Every structure is written in structure tokens, then in C-alpha cells.
Amino acid sequence: MAKHHISTTINGEPVEFLCNTEQTMLDVLRDELHLTGTKEGCATGDCGACSITVDGRLVCACLMLGVEAEGHAVETIEGMADGDKLHPLQQKFLEYAALQCGICTPGFLIASKALLEHNPDPTEEEARYWLAGNLCRCTGYDKIIRAVLDTAADMRGAS
Amino acid sequence: MHNFTYHAANSVADAAAKVADGEDAVLMAGGMTLLPTLKQRLAQPSDIIDLAGVAGLSGIRVEGGTVTVGAMTTHDTVANSSEVAAAIPALAAVAGHIGDPQVRNRGTIGGSIANNDPAADYPAALVGLGATVCTNRREIAAGDFFTSMFETALDEGEIVTSVRFPAPETAAYMKFPNPASRYAIVGVFVARTTGGSVRVAVTGAAGCVYRETAMETALEGDFSPAALDGMTASADDLNEDIHASAEYRAHLVGVMARRAVAACG
């Protein structure tokens, strides 16, 4: 069967790719575009390890077909740092040791960035509600939540 | 996933034609259940007709006492709509507690109700509020729409276009969620109309959403949690799995119903 030719934007750059209908956006990112920062956890939309944004909205790349990316703007973890300069969330996750094995981390960072763009001053409850679709089996979540809230405070102070 | 042919429909008529043309075509309205089902190879459609690009299927309209939600409106849009929050706050609350943000950004009301998962939240809201499901062919009362587990009154190729909700005098939804999936182990939607009639719709407990008519009668006499004291659902025919026995679900129906009435204020 002929492959689909998809034109999209990934991390601000125009990108074209070929994919089969049965390839998910996660398959496309990892296997076709070699953007392996986005992780596969459960592959059924429960764990959030494959979180990306599409037109600014947080979604699971494992529950989106590659063909659905046509004409949309995708953001992945690879677009988060500015060259060697880490995003404030990435820096704060390091300072707080808000990760251990690391497989959930790209998803948490993408989801946290989406949260702070939507709500620069979240309460702890709002942060936990927003990050409910991301599972972590190492940290117990507390360090992640504290890192996100501290980043939010820093970013508010800087702006 | 097995291979299939992907079609992006550009109108409801186009989608209907493509469904009719396909050997075993299915509609995709968000894909939050369809895609996991395909990945587990539990389904093997020949064609997927994606409704995401169909203009006019998403959006919210509030006119008088009626809230109309387009079939492709996401849960996140309903949850964060100030118009819905003003007209039927319980409906916004239902949408805001479906799954997680990643699901709410993709899942749609039309997809949810057409799938009719026995533990989904929207069926309780539709039946509790006495909503009307509008399709490309007709209008169906919510009470007639949900027929049995994963089954609805939709005919082959019939497409949900919107859902119309009459605003109640008061309503509330209480859910005892599965802590991992956030599907309802039991969810109860209670609504009272301005005329004083009461609906108590239960999801998660049985194979399909249903109404607790004895509770409705009791609440029409006295709309207070105390009116339901000692009342519980019959455990006959309720779901039983590793999460909860039928007896526990029956108990939860009473607890969630009392909490919902209390939340109505």
C-alpha cells in the first residue's frame, strides 16, 4: 500500500515524512524521524510517557496516527532546550532530582510546560490535576510537583 | 495494528458515503478507545473515516435553556466552557473528570456516547439530563439511545452530529473512579427539572447506563440526601470484577446518589 506523504511542523521547523496508516505519531517520531526523546511506556494512552503537544494541546503520541499530523504543529522534548541552554523546567527537574530512571521525564516536562503556558501560577492541586495523565514509578511525584511549582515561581519572577 | 485505509472526511455526507463504501469501515471521533482497540488487534476495520476535519461538528451553543454540544467537541472544551459552566455546571464537571488531560484534549462527546462504554461518564449525564442525541438522520432521546454494553440505537452508517441538553434546575454528578483509569466504578448523575421531576442515572455499575426509578420517586417527594437513607441498588445483574463486587457496586450507587443530591445544594 502506498505510503502517505505528510507535511507538518515539528519544533518550529517544517517537516515532511512518509508513513503507513497504521504507524502512530510515536512510531513516526521515533522510527522515521529518529526523535527518540519521546518515550513509549504503556502504548495505550495511560502513562503519558509519549506526551507531545499538537497545536499547543497536550496529547499522547501513541494514540494519534501519523497521518493525523498533516497541517498541524507538533512540539516534542527535542524542542524544549534552547541549544545547550536547558528550559527552566529541565534545570529545575535536575536540581530537585525529580527523576530517577528517566523514562517518564520527557512526558512530564512536556506536560508541565503545557501547564505553565496555560496557567503560570498553578496551585499544587491544579498541578496534580494537570499532570494526572503522567505516571512515574520512581519519584512518588512529590519532587516533580515541587520542581514544577518552583519553576512557575521563578518564571513569574523573571517575566 | 493491522493495516487499514485512512480517510479524512470533509463533511458529514462525505463521511456517511465513505462508511457505506467501505467493506468494514469505522468512524474515528477522537480515537481514544478505537486506537487502543486496534493496537490490541481486537478490531480489524478495512477503513477508518476520521471526523476530525469535518467543519461544523465541534462547538458549543447555548440558547435559552438549551446547551447544544457538537459531536466532535472535546471533553476539555466542554470542561472549560464558561457558557456550559453557567448553564449546566454539572455537565462541565462531568467532562472535566473524564480520563486525564491527554484524553480530554482528544476524546469527544460523540465518540464517547457512540462507543457506550459501560463505565463512561457522559452516558450518565445524557440520561440524567434527559438529553437528545441528534444524528445525520434523526433525533433520539438519550433514554432510548444507550441500548446495552457498547451498543446504541445508531443504525449502520448513522453519525452523531450533536447532543442537546435542557438545563435543569439543579444537577450534580458523583463518581467513584478507578484510581488508575479514572473510569467510573460507579457514577451517579442526579438532576431535578424546574417542574420538579428527578432523574437518577447510574453508570459503571451495570452493563449499560440505567435509571434508579425508586430513588427518583423518593427524591420527587423529598429532594434531600435523607430521602435516600437505607436505599441501595439491587446487586442483581451488576458488574463484578477485580475492582469491585456487585454488592459493593450496589452499595456505592446509594452512596454516590446521596452525595450527588447533597452536591445539588
Image (cartoon, coloured by chain):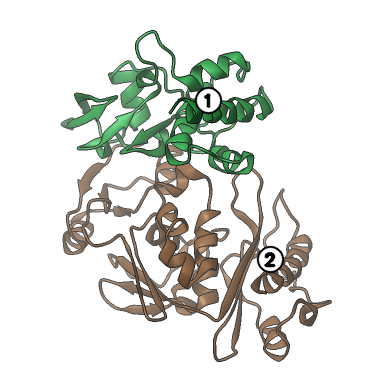
Chain letter for brown, please.
B
The mark closer to the camera, 2 or 1, is 1
Q: Is residue A152 at least partly visible in the picture?
A: yes
Q: Is residue A41 at least partly visible in the picture?
A: no
How many numbered markers are drawn? 2
Residue B160: name its quadrant: bottom left
Residue B238 numbered mark, or none: 2
Pick the residue in front: A13 or A87.
A87
* Quadrant position of the C terminus of chain A in the picture: top left
Q: Secondary structure at mark 2?
A: loop
Q: Secondary structure at mark 1?
A: helix
* Residue B150 point in image, percent of width and height: 48, 61
Residue A154 numbered mark, or none: 1
Q: Is residue B58 above or below residue B242?
A: below
* Residue B63 point in image, percent of width and height: 35, 77
Residue at screen point 18% across, 59% down: B11
Of all chains, the one bearing label 1 is: A
Rendered hue of chain A is green
